[in-house]
Amino acid sequence: MPLLERLQTLDRRIIFLFIGLSVLVPLLFPITFPEHPSPIVTAIYDGIESLPERSIVLMPFDYDPSTAPELDPMATSLMRHCMTRNLRVCTMALWPEGQGMANNIMSIVVEREFPDKVYGEDYVNLGYKAGAQGLINTLLLSMRSMYTTDAAGTPVDEIPLMKNIHTLRDFAFIMNLSAGRPGTKEWIQFAGDPGDIPIASGSTAVQAPLMYPYYPSQMVGMMGGLKGAAEYEALLVKGYPQFKNSSAVATGLMAPQAFAHLVIMVFIIIGNIIFFVERRQKDR
Amino acid sequence: MKKTIPLLITFVVGLALILAIFIPPEPFHTMNREFSVYFDIIAVFAFILGGGNLIRVHGNKISRKKKDYKYSFVTLLGFFVTLFVGLLKIGGPPGIQGEVMASGSWFLFIFNAILTPLTATMFALLAFYVASASFRAFRAKTTEATILLLAGFIILLGRTFFGYYITSWLPDSLSFLEIPNLANWIMAWPNTAGQRAIVIGISLGVAATSLRIILGIERSYLGSGE
Amino acid sequence: MNLSPLELTINGILTLMILSFLYKDNPFYKFAEHLFVGVSAAYWMVQGVWQTLMPNLIARIFPGAVSSFLPDAVGKSPDYYFLIPAAFGLLLLTRLLPKGNWLSRWALAFVVGYAAGTNFVRYLQSDFVAQIRSTMVPLVVLKDSGGLDLGQSFSHLVLIVGVLSGLVYFFFSKEHKGTTGRISRVGIWILMVTFGASFGYTVMARISLLLGRMQSLRDWVEHLIGLF
């Protein structure tokens, strides 16, 4: 069978195999390349750097395990950055799975790397509440109308960090980690714009292009996908060299990511060559 | 009764929330807050409704021995075990008083060992299908398709180190032609322009539909019949 | 995420079960798929009950009944206003009944009315007015030194022309002929660049998710190798 015909009838499982290998092989033999932060990512870093010490940052974890490979590295870097800068962090979730994702980041970053930080004073996890954009609307008017306790059931009035937090307007910054809806768009529509609260976003790559119209007037900055996370890691290492070894999760994954992009591009090019050759044959 | 009352509820709630934005003082402030809390609470009943529906659908499948009905046992078993473990907070250190996802709880175990791989792998499968679909369908047949393809390629290259190395030899005066810079420019300007046109269009559509709903012109959400 | 050996093993097996679909549909995949549906529905229900229903509804209507496991309810008096959302919630559940399920429309009407009321204002504010304001940028941008900033001026031109032509493309009340047709054609090109960018980012996202799974499998294999 001629090559062209063979390629036309290529079993999709062969493509699957190439994609699998393009990801797996570089993962087994890790290499890293320097990252060059883009302005939209640098804006978040600068935003957090400009906050006064002890400011309270709200970090809604609006994602589930399906998008954790993209958003966990962002959450990790942001949490490290906030803790190093002596900011206070309050987490919550519009997604039911978000509570587990927040717990995970707190245990692997705050509890291990910052053992001197005290739960309730330096960080708190308010957990999940139902309502999506309705919840944001409620919190803009009154936090305690919905968050009467933290995720573990401790009354909010007994948590020192929450003492002066009555509405979303009392947060200095909202750093949303978002995998879709409800997520960054709703935070901008229901909190950022009406409450005049600075919002930045860690978005999945699928969502990132949709969020660009809000930047920079309605959204301080954005990390888009694994690339955005890797850029933020580079910024963090540049500003705080003590994280050189730990802050490299997304950076380490960018090599397999690049090879997989290349394989997909090669397949698209082959597909187009087949198309043009076929068209020429038909024209004849 | 079956349609008039729902239409009245929609009208009152919708109008009150619009008025609350323009007339912040009482009673609209309280109405805005209380309606929001009610909305959040009703949302939970939707989860319960979803669970109930799942039992009904798979129970039906089993009782009528429909195709693949045996797998419905797996669904129901997974559902009831997770529900039992979660509602009783089994295994968590402080028991029923602690967090449902407390370290050591069986619910957290289900989250880590079962829910996480299942949901993550389901979405990871798409990587393979995106590649296969691109190979078969992504053709530069027309000018429009060629523009789409070129933009996609610049982004795919520009978001990796390949993009840097391919064009890093360009002199500083032409640095704007470096692939990563081109990718950033595409995202910041043409992409923003296109997305903004879509966003503006959608916002007008949402506003018009919302008004139609509040005024009772749009009633499809109530279903058919009396 | 730090997993115990047992969690890692179940995690790995279920990952392989789902990935087996790449070869063809099979009983292992079907098992995992059906388990996913059941577990995720229950997970959402449990989170809804413990994080919202108990503290925000039950603890407010019957604080005495739940004070033994919800410290926030201790000493609180009942707030009977919350019977209203409780009633709406229960009405929503009538959808499951063979008769009288029309009552669920009342709850649905509340939800739809709320969404319509809030969306009307928020979409107009954030996605209409704010977007138009952000598009009003100068076409001639000067550098600090006084000269013309060609790059920035061109970018602004692309933004303004792109938004306007994109909107013309979506304007279906006038036939796309003549000048309108030419402008809408530019709109299509801009939208094609937008979709191309979205395509690139979507590929990026899917590969990232696959990477996460591969990492998880690698951890499991390393654990298995460690056993021997």
Image (spheres, coloured by chain):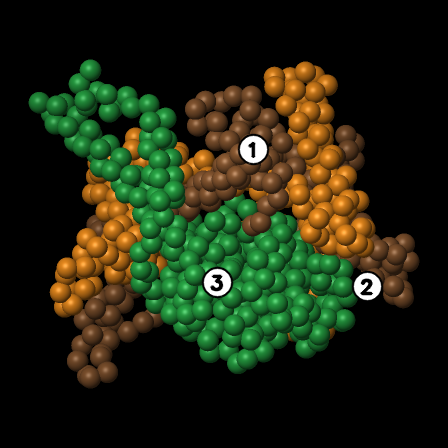
**In the picture provided, is A284 more to the left or to the right than A24?**
left
| Display colour for chain C | brown
The mark closer to the camera, 3 or 2, is 3
Q: Which chain is orange?
A: B
Is B57 drawn above or below residue A35 in the view shown? above
Q: Earlier in the sequence, mark 2 or mark 1?
A: 1
| Display colour for chain A | green
What amino acid type should be assigned to the residue bearing mark 2?
Asp
Is B161 drawn above or below residue C133 in the view shown? above
Which residue position is annotated with label 1?
Answer: C14
Q: Are marks 3 and 2 on the same chain?
A: no
Residue at position x 17%, y 18% in the image:
A2
**In the picture provided, is B123 more to the left or to the right than A151?**
left
Front-most of A195 and A118? A118
Q: Confirm whether residue B73 shows in the render.
A: yes
Which residue position is annotated with label 2?
Answer: C72
